[in-house]
Image: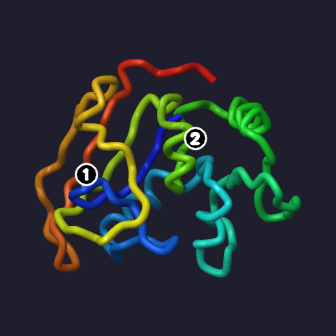
Amino acid sequence: MKAIVHADKNWGIGKNNSLMFKIPADMKFFKEKTTGNIVVMGSNTLKSLPQGKPLKDRINIVLYPEGEDREDCKIVHSLNELFTEIKKYPPERVFVIGGQMMYKTLLEYCDEVLVTKVEAEGDADAFFENLDKNENFKLVHESEPIETNSYTIKFTTYKNLSVKPI
């Protein structure tokens, strides 16, 4: 399983249950990586999507303890139920996409984390763990800086050296 996220200089990932930056290159990267795959999210992330609808062309699994079943995505009500659902798919096709609590809960189970680093401060109220300070994670790829939509970004990949099995 992988996590995919964009983060500002302080590892901020969101503000007011929304993305802090509109960066088309990051959205394109996210879409390329997740389309045709499985995305795992919490209920707040689902609510933050346009019209609260799941992402197209992906299997959407949502941890939503008090949520009702829906036709357009798979609602799971507990972590055990989530793990049972995730195990149905090849791990390399499963992407955790947010929010803060889902990342925190599932990070140790992710073998890889794809981080779009944004050289800016987004006044975040939601954060991702600083992987540069986590001894279990190693930076294994960093793109050259890209100037886009008035932001400088880098696409990075971190490898989890101590993946916890589901």
In the rendering, at what x and y percent does residue 47 appear?
65, 71
Q: Earlier in the sequence, mark 1 or mark 2?
A: 2
Is 159 situated above or below 153? above
Quadrant that contains the C terminus: top right
Q: Residue at x 55, y 37 (%)?
A: 106
Front-most of 102 and 40? 102
Q: Which amino acid type is marked by label 2?
A: Val
Q: Above or below — where is 5 with respect to 70? A: above
Q: Which mark is residue 155?
A: 1
Q: What colour scheme was applied to this rendering of the protein?
A: rainbow
Q: Amino acid at mark 1?
A: Phe
- Residue 70 locus on image (x, y percent): 85, 63
Report crowding for label 2: few under 14, some 14 to 19, many 20 or more residues within 10 A (C-alpha): many
- Which x, y percent locates residue 24? 34, 73
Q: Secondary structure at mark 1?
A: strand
- Res. 58 image quadrant: bottom right
For residue 1, side relative to residue 137 (left or right)? right
Residue at the disc numbered 2: 94
Sort mark 1 into few (<14), some (14-19) or many (20+) by Cα contacts within 10 Å.
Answer: some
Instruction: Tell me what residue is drawn at x 30 percent, y 38 percent.
Output: 131
Q: Is residue 97 left or right of residue 56?
A: left
Residue that sits furthest to the front in the current view: 125
Look at the numbered disc 2 and give the secondary structure of its residue.
Answer: strand
